[in-house]
Amino acid sequence: MVIMEIAVCGKTNVGKTSFFSASTLVDAEISNRVFTTIKPNRGVTFVRAVCPCKELKVKCNPQNSKCIDSTRLIPVKLVDIAGLVPGAHLGKGLGNQFLSDIMEADAIIHVVDISGSTDINGNQVPPGTHSPESDILFFQEEIELWLLDVLKRGFTKHADFTAMVQKQLSGLKVNFQLIEELIKGVNLKPDSSDEEFRRFLRLLMEKSKPALIAGNKIDIEGANEIYQSLKEKYNIVPCSAQAELALRKAAKIGAINYMPGENSFEIVQNIDEKRMKALEFITTHVLSVFGSTGVQEAINKTVFGLLDMIVVYPVENEHKLSNKQGDVLPDALLLRNGSTALDLAYKVHEDIGKKFISALDARTRKSIASDHRLKNGDIISIKAGR
């Protein structure tokens, strides 16, 4: 079953690998050196959704996900991509690899040092001396210039223009129909200026690779003021990846009970003074101020907000809410909002989609048509022919 993929990226030394490690608990190398990440780190994180088990008073037995206290945790791929440097579109640093890796993802979490304590090259500077907004614009520009180069590399004015654009961008996991619609929408022509081409590419990225900004290092003094000045202008979530990483590691060894995305944790065993001070700092400067570390919120907003996904629970037995093996509410699937019962059938398995006969809403016990639009939290039984 295909799992969606989110790219975690940004310039070097802003905490993106800490964000990745906190989200996945993959032991990726973290340091204050530029180019710590050379090859992409890959792992699995989770988005949070309400599991129907509590509402329906059943004990679920998840197979493709987890359920903790009626919170369903659904897997999503996360990729930590090498840091971006100025001139990446010209191949500087690991530019070409960086940008092509981004194009494999369904969405982007752009980690920015919201405290302004790293310069354009990722070197540490005093907090507040570098503009996080310039990093946002720099990231956008590098992608646009790289895509412009890819587009014009085999450019010829005598070819079918739309077909040529589609061919040049065919390796970037973008929708051909969307390309055609945007070309018409912006009236792009072979003799359009570079700025007009960049506008087209900007819109293409917004539609095909939507990005959320994770304003990292929010717990550094002065960072909140910078965040407040930018939050109305950009889709940005304040976060502390280091705080989330500390909490998840403490939970992993059994020192605390902590559910990612929550605003508190419970200490369940004696811990040393150093760790206690760290936890007190996180409580005072992160959780009490922002309501969470922001890491889980960034992931959830990317999946449910930017990508507009819903969660649907397919079952085979609508009476027991189970599969053939008797597992109750076994799977939680992410589908685009607006997906139909037939879309769900194909998501479960291509053969089931091809042999689709009917579907039934397990809550209402009413039959639904193949083009019935599903809602978040639906429990659906698909009937297929042999």
Image (tube, rainbow, N blue to C red):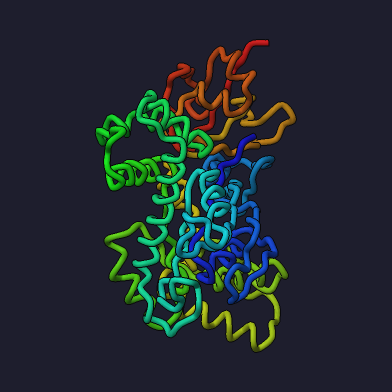
Q: Residue at x 44, y 30 (%)?
A: 166
Using the image, determine if residue 63 lies above or below residue 380: below
Above/below status of 332 relative to 176: below
Residue 277's image quarter? Answer: bottom right
Q: Quadrant of the C terminus?
A: top right
Q: Residue at x 52, y 61 (%)?
A: 92
The residue lying toward the viewer, choosing from 369 and 181, is 181
Q: Is residue 132 left or right of residue 95?
A: left
Return the x and y of residue 370 as percentages of the image width and height: 47, 17
Q: Residue furthest bottom?
A: 273
Query: Which residue does the image show at 46% across and 59% down from the upper left?
Result: 110
Quadrant of the image containing the N terminus:
top right
The residue lying toward the viewer, choosing from 308 and 369, is: 308
Position in image of residue 84 (x %, y %): 50, 62
Kindly tell me whether residue 48 is visible in this rendering: no
Q: Residue 239: in sight, yes or no?
A: yes
How far across and down, in percent of the image, does residue 51 sit?
55, 45
User: What residue lies at 45% left-to-right and 29% top-to-bottom?
Assistant: 339
Place of residue 249 in the rendered image (x, y in percent of width and height, measured from the top left): 66, 69
- Relative to the observer, which residue lies in front, 242 or 114? 114
In the image: residue 181, left or right of residue 357: left
Q: So how many labels did they put on this image? A: 0
Between 137 and 326, the one nearer to me in the picture: 137
The residue furthest right is: 325
